[in-house]
Image (spheres, rainbow, N blue to C red):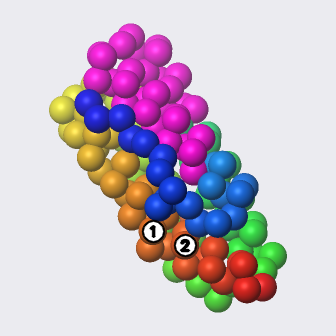
């Protein structure tokens, strides 16, 4: 399993957001590790719970910030967040029902990490550029 790593190209130039993205990556790595190592159901459930909670905290921070600044791209950005909220909720639900499946392992390994990197580059950076001009 490849660990996801922070690098400067991911910086959006807003400290609070960068710090949260770094923490999100940590939670992601913890969950991915627990799944790859086929840790106990309880342990995996815990790491997925942390990842879910942190994802929500981060998304609401960005959405609150965008609302405060009257960002015109809020709706589109929020729609992307909502897509991931749904995907993540479904993954966790599948895990609770079926335990670790290859579908879950694959989703964690490729989809989630890639989603985050792409989202930061394409969506978060657009908003950050707007926030810095405001
Ligand atoms: Fe975002
Ligand atoms: Fe973000």
* In this rendering, position of residue 78 left or right of residue 97: right
The magenta stretch spans residue 44: yes
Instruction: State the residue at coordinates (39%, 41%).
Output: 4
Q: Element type at marker 2?
A: helix
| Prevailing secondary structure class for the magenta stretch in the rendered image | helix
Q: Of residues 104 and 32, which is closer to you in this image? A: 32
Near mark 2 (Cα within 10 A), the count class, few <14, some 14-19 or many ≥20, is some
Q: Residue furthest left?
A: 102
The magenta stretch spans residue 122: no
Tell me where residue 52 sits by quadrant.
top right
Tell me where residue 24 sits by quadrant.
top right
Residue corresponding to mark 2: 125
Instruction: State the residue at coordinates (22%, 29%).
Output: 101
Check whether the beta carbons of the residues at disc 1 and disc 2 lie within 8 A of each other: yes
Instruction: State the residue at coordinates (69%, 64%).
Output: 14
Residue corresponding to mark 1: 121
Instruction: State the residue at coordinates (38%, 11%).
Output: 40
Q: Position of residue 91 (x, y in %)?
A: 37, 41
Q: Is residue 107 above or below residue 62?
A: above
Q: Of residues 99 and 68, which is closer to you in this image? A: 68
Q: Is residue 30 above or below residue 24?
A: above
Q: CA distance from mark 1 to mark 2?
A: 6 Å
Q: Element type at marker 1?
A: helix
Q: Which residues are magenta?
A: 21-50
Q: Position of residue 9 (x, y in %)?
A: 47, 61
Q: Of residues 86 and 53, which is closer to you in this image? A: 53
Quarter of the image with the N terminus is top left
Let me know if residue 94 appears in the view.
no
Quarter of the image with the C terminus is bottom right
Q: Position of residue 7 (x, y in %)?
A: 47, 51
Let me know if residue 4 appears in the view.
yes
């Amino acid at each position: 399993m490849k660990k996801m790593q922070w690098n400067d190209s991911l910086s959006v130039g807003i400290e609070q957001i960068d710090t949260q993205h770094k923490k999100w990556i940590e939670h992601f790595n913890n969950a991915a590790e627990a799944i790859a190592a086929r840790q106990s159901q309880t342990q995996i459930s815990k790491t997925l719970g942390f990842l879910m909670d942190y994802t929500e905290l981060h998304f609401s921070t960005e959405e609150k910030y965008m609302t405060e600044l009257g960002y015109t791209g809020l709706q589109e950005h929020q729609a992307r967040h909502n897509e991931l909220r749904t995907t993540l909720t479904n993954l966790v639900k599948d895990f609770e029902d079926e335990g670790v499946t290859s579908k879950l392992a694959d989703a964690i390994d490729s989809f989630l990490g890639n989603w985050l990197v792409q989202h930061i580059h394409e969506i978060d950076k657009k908003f950050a550029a707007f926030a810095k001009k405001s």
